[in-house]
Amino acid sequence: MPLTLILQENDYSYIGTIILGILLSGVVFLIFLFIRKIITTILDGLEMGYALFTKRPIFIHFYLFKRKLNRYQIHILKAQFSFYNRLNEKHQTYFRHRVATFIKRKKFIGKEGFVVTEEAKVLISATAIMLTFGFRNYIIEYIKTIIIYPTAYYSRFSKASHKGEFNPRLKTLVLSWDNFIEGHRIKNDKLNLGIHEFAHAIHFNSIKQEDINAILFVDTFNELRTMLSSNEQLKRDLVASEFIRSYAFTNDSELLAVIIETFIESPKTFKKLFPEIYGKVKQMLNFNFSGY
């Protein structure tokens, strides 16, 4: 047999082996995906059943690798973020990982001369992480960009002056730094721009997502709305108390943002005056802020 023919036969045999290997690998990969989907579906179903009775996910924190903040960023947390200091050592590690991940995943932009500092990145990110610390999925996917103005600004979208806003279409959160920092430093006036705007973002994000915390958040808020609409006396007491500022009753979205501000900034009084409403907010966020 001519040498060229032997080479050609060997080439075809080698190519056939490669093709067969690729096909087998593809089949194995498809089987893996199918099995993973079945397992995921089963686990999701089990967790949904668990959540039906407990109103919380099976677990919150699980990280193979934890991101780290640098020494200066940790100093900012310790010096300026009281929630962080109330956590135990293990949860502080989780909190730092989440803040570091949030900073990495978001784009921070300064406007009108504002220079984005480490302080701005850490305090804004820590506010988001505080609100989602009871969530397994904490990134808030409907925020991609965070724009910071030095003070109140004119919005070309609403044609009005704003201290802050959330734009879901652009996946952008906008804050005025002076108002953000004032709300952060005054702990008990139930006015906190960062909490307010992130609450809007979490609400919208939860409506669009399908993870267990998102479902519980939306369902529990619907329960709260029903509670207030069906219990006229409770609503009258809430309005008459002036504990929650009247702006809350502008619409459902503002109601949610204001009660979360109140939950964070005045938890003990909130729990004492309106335990039913407090309980619903605690269930939505999946943590008891008065316990920290």
Image (cartoon, grey):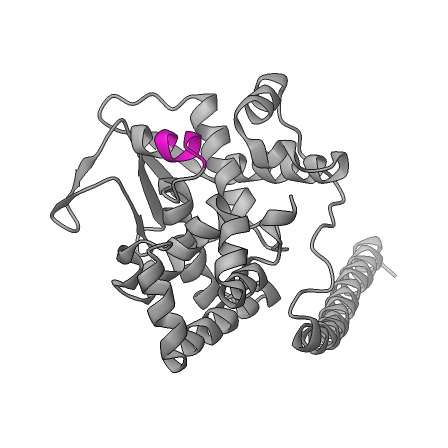
**Can the viewer see residue 139?**
no
User: Looking at the picture, does residue 250 appear above or below residue 150?
Assistant: below
**Quadrant in the picture for residue 207:** bottom left
With respect to residue 165, does 213 lie above or below? below
Instruction: Give the farthest residue toward the top.
Output: 72
**Residue at 46 percent of width and 69 percent of height:** 221
Residue 182 image offset from top left, x and y in percent: 35, 30
Q: Position of residue 83 (x, y in %)?
A: 58, 37
Residue 256, quarter of the rendered image:
bottom left
Q: Using the rendered image of the protein, determine whether residue 216 is visible from the camera's viewpoint.
A: yes
Look at the magenta stretch and give its main secondary structure: helix
Q: In x, y percent, where is residue 37?
A: 70, 73
Image quadrant in which the C terminus is located = top right
Task: From the viewer's side, name the closer residue of 278 and 59.
Answer: 278
In the shown orientation, is residue 57 left or right of residue 7? left
The magenta region covers 181-187
Which of 38/192 is in front?
A: 192
**Looking at the rendering, in which quadrant would you find the N terminus?**
bottom right
Counting labels gives 0
Residue at image position (50%, 29%) is 122
